[in-house]
C-alpha cells in the first residue's frame, strides 16, 4: 500500500516537472527563429551567437543584456541591437528590432511582441496572408499573360533575324551588280560628255568673241562721241582748254581744275583722235559727263559716224573670220552657221544686241549632243540612286543586327520604336536604342536628355535597366542622363518619368519583355501556402 502511494507520488512529480520544464522552454525560446532553436538548449550554457562569451542559460531572456550582439535577449527589449522573431503563424515569420517588444504597439501580425503588456493585439496574419496571396496570384497572372506575349516577341525575333540575314545577303549581291553597272554607266556618261563639252565650248567661245566685238564697237562709238563732244572747235584735236571745262574730271575736287592737271591727263597740250583713243579715253570714261547745251553747236555728222562704225564693224568681222580660218577649218563652218542663224557681226541688229549678255540658243547639233549626254547622265544618276538606297538599307540592317536585344531577342520589338509619356509641362519621348528627349508643351526647343549607352541592370539580369547618357548639358551642371527601369506589363508603355537628382532622369517602363517565366509557372496549392 505504501509502495503504491510512493509510485503515484513519483508519477505526479514527473508530470509536473515535464509541464514545468515545457513552460520554461517555451518562455525561454520566445522571439527565437525556428532555424536557431538548436542554439538555445536549456540544459546547456548559452554561447552568444557572435562567439563573444558563454553565459548560464538562465540568463537568456532575463531582461538583461549579457551578449554584445544581443542574442541572449531575443524575447525582450533589453538589448538595443537585439532582434525579435515574430512567428506569425499562417503568414510570414519576420524579425523586428527588439526595442519594439512591449512598446504598446502591435508590430507582429500575431501580436506576439506585446506578450507582457495589457495591449490586446488582433491577429491579422490571416488577412495579410489572403492579401499577399491575392497579390501574388495577380502578379502571377500578369507574368503569365506577359510571358505569352514575350514568347511571341522572341518567335518573331527569330524569324526577323533570319529574314534580315537573308535580305542582307540579297542586298549585298544586288549592290555588287549595281556597282558594276554604275561603272559602265559612268564610262558612257564620260564618253557622251566629251563631244558635248567640246560643242558647248565652241559655242561659248563664239559668243564671247561676238560679245567682245559688240563691246569694242560700243567702246569705239562711245569714244568717238566723247571726242566729238570735247572737240568743240572741230579742229580734230582735244586741247587743254576744251578738257578743262569738264571739272567733274578733277580728282581732288578741292582746288580749281588747273592746266597742269589737265595736261597730266592729256600728256600734251592737245591730242588727236588716235592719241585720245590710246591714252585719254580710259582715264576719263567713267567720270566724263556732257556739258549742258547752252548754245547751238555744230552737230556731229551722224552719217559719218554711222559709216565709221559700220566700217570698223566690218573690219573687226573680217579679222575675226581670218583668224578663225587660220586656226581651225571646221570652226569657220560653225562660225558661218552661227552667223547665219544669229546675225552676228555686220548682220547683227546693233541697236538691239549691243548690251545683250544672254548666251544665244545652241545649234541643232549641239542640242543633240546635249540631249545624248543628258540621257547618259540620267541613266548614271538613276543607278547611282539605287546604289545609295541599297547601301542605306544594308547599313540599317547591320545596325539592327548589332543591337543587343536580350539573350533570346525579347527586346527586339523596341528596334526603331519611340514611345511618349505626357506629364503636365513636358512630353518625354524615348526612341529605344537611339535617344530620349524632353519636349516642352508650352513651346520652345526640345532637349536631349540622353543617347543610348548600355544595359545596366543587376548582375543576375542586366536587361532590366538601360542607360542613356551624354545628353544636353545642364546650366552650371552635368550632362543630362536617363535610366530606364523595366517591369512586367502587357503593353510597351512608359508609366512614369521623374528627376530624382538634378539632370538625372528616371523612367519606369512596362513591357512583356520584362516578364519572368519562373513567376508565371510558380505552383499554387489551394490547401497550403508557403510564405
Image: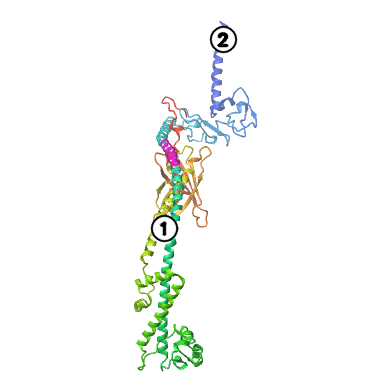
Q: The N terminus is located in which quarter?
A: top right
Front disc: 2 or 1: 1
* Camera-nearest residue between 451 and 62: 451
Please provide percent x and percent y for residue 184: 45, 52
* Camera-nearest residue between 319 and 412: 319
Left or right of 85? Residue 301 is: left
**What residue is drawn where x is 40% and y is 70%?**
333
Rendered view: 421 above or below 377:
above
Rendered view: 244 above or below 451:
below
Q: Secondary structure at mark 1?
A: loop
Please provide percent x and percent y for residue 403: 48, 44
Please identify the dominant SS of the magenta region: helix
Q: Which residue is mark 1?
A: 444
* Camera-nearest residue between 330 and 529: 330
Residue 60 in the magenta stretch? The answer is: no
Q: Which residue is mark 2?
A: 7
Amino acid at each position: 500500500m505504501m509502495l503504491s502511494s510512493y509510485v503515484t507520488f513519483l508519477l505526479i512529480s514527473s508530470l509536473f516537472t515535464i509541464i514545468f520544464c515545457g513552460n520554461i522552454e517555451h518562455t525561454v525560446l520566445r522571439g527565437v527563429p525556428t532555424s536557431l532553436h538548436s542554439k538555445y538548449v536549456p540544459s546547456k550554457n548559452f554561447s552568444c551567437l557572435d562567439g563573444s562569451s558563454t553565459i548560464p542559460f538562465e540568463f537568456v531572456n532575463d531582461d538583461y543584456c549579457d551578449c554584445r550582439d544581443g542574442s541572449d535577449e531575443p524575447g525582450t527589449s533589453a538589448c538595443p541591437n537585439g532582434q525579435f522573431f515574430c512567428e506569425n503563424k499562417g503568414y510570414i515569420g519576420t524579425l523586428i528590432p527588439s526595442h519594439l517588444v512591449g512598446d504598446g504597439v502591435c508590430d507582429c501580425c500575431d501580436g506576439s511582441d506585446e506578450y507582457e503588456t495589457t495591449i490586446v493585439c488582433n491577429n491579422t496574419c490571416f488577412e495579410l496572408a489572403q492579401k499577399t496571396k491575392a497579390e501574388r496570384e495577380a502578379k502571377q497572372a500578369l507574368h503569365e499573360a506577359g510571358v505569352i506575349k514575350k514568347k511571341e516577341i522572341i518567335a518573331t525575333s527569330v524569324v526577323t533575324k533570319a529574314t534580315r540575314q537573308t535580305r542582307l545577303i540579297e542586298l549585298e549581291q544586288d549592290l555588287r551588280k549595281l556597282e558594276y553597272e554604275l561603272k559602265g554607266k559612268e564610262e558612257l556618261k564620260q564618253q557622251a560628255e566629251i563631244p558635248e563639252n567640246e560643242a558647248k565650248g565652241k559655242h561659248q567661245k563664239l559668243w564671247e568673241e561676238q560679245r567682245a566685238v559688240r563691246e569694242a564697237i560700243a567702246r569705239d562709238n562711245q569714244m568717238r562721241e566723247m571726242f566729238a563732244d570735247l572737240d568743240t572747235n572741230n579742229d580734230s584735236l582735244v586741247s587743254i582748254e576744251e578738257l578743262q571745262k569738264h571739272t567733274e574730271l578733277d580728282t581732288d575736287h578741292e582746288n580749281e581744275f588747273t592746266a597742269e592737271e589737265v595736261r597730266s591727263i592729256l600728256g600734251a597740250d592737245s591730242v588727236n583722235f588716235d592719241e585720245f583713243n590710246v591714252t585719254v579715253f580710259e582715264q576719263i570714261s567713267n567720270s566724263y559727263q556732257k556739258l549742258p547745251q547752252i548754245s547751238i553747236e555744230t552737230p556731229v555728222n551722224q552719217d559719218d559716224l554711222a559709216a565709221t562704225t559700220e566700217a570698223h564693224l566690218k573690219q573687226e568681222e573680217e579679222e575675226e573670220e581670218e583668224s578663225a580660218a587660220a586656226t581651225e577649218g571646221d570652226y569657220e563652218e560653225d562660225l558661218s552657221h552661227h552667223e547665219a542663224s544669229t546675225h552676228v557681226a555686220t548682220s547683227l541688229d546693233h541697236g538691239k544686241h549691243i548690251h545683250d549678255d544672254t548666251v544665244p540658243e545652241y545649234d541643232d547639233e549641239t542640242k543633240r549632243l546635249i540631249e545624248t549626254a543628258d540621257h547618259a547622265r540620267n541613266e548614271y544618276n538613276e543607278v547611282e540612286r539605287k546604289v545609295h538606297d541599297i547601301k542605306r538599307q544594308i547599313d540599317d540592317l547591320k545596325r539592327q543586327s548589332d543591337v543587343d536585344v536580350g539573350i533570346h531577342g525579347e527586346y527586339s520589338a523596341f528596334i526603331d520604336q519611340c514611345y511618349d509619356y505626357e506629364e503636365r509641362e513636358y512630353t518625354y519621348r524615348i526612341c529605344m536604342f537611339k535617344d530620349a528627349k524632353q519636349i516642352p508643351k508650352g513651346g520652345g526647343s526640345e532637349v536631349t536628355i540622353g543617347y543610348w549607352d548600355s544595359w545596366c541592370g543587376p548582375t543576375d539580369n542586366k536587361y532590366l535597366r538601360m542607360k542613356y547618357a551624354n545628353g544636353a548639358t545642364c546650366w552650371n551642371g552635368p550632362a543630362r542622363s536617363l535610366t530606364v527601369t523595366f517591369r512586367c506589363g502587357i503593353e510597351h508603355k512608359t508609366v512614369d518619368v521623374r528627376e530624382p537628382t538634378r539632370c538625372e532622369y528616371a523612367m519606369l517602363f512596362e513591357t512583356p519583355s520584362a516578364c519572368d517565366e519562373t513567376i508565371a509557372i510558380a505552383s499554387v496549392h489551394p490547401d497550403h501556402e508557403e510564405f
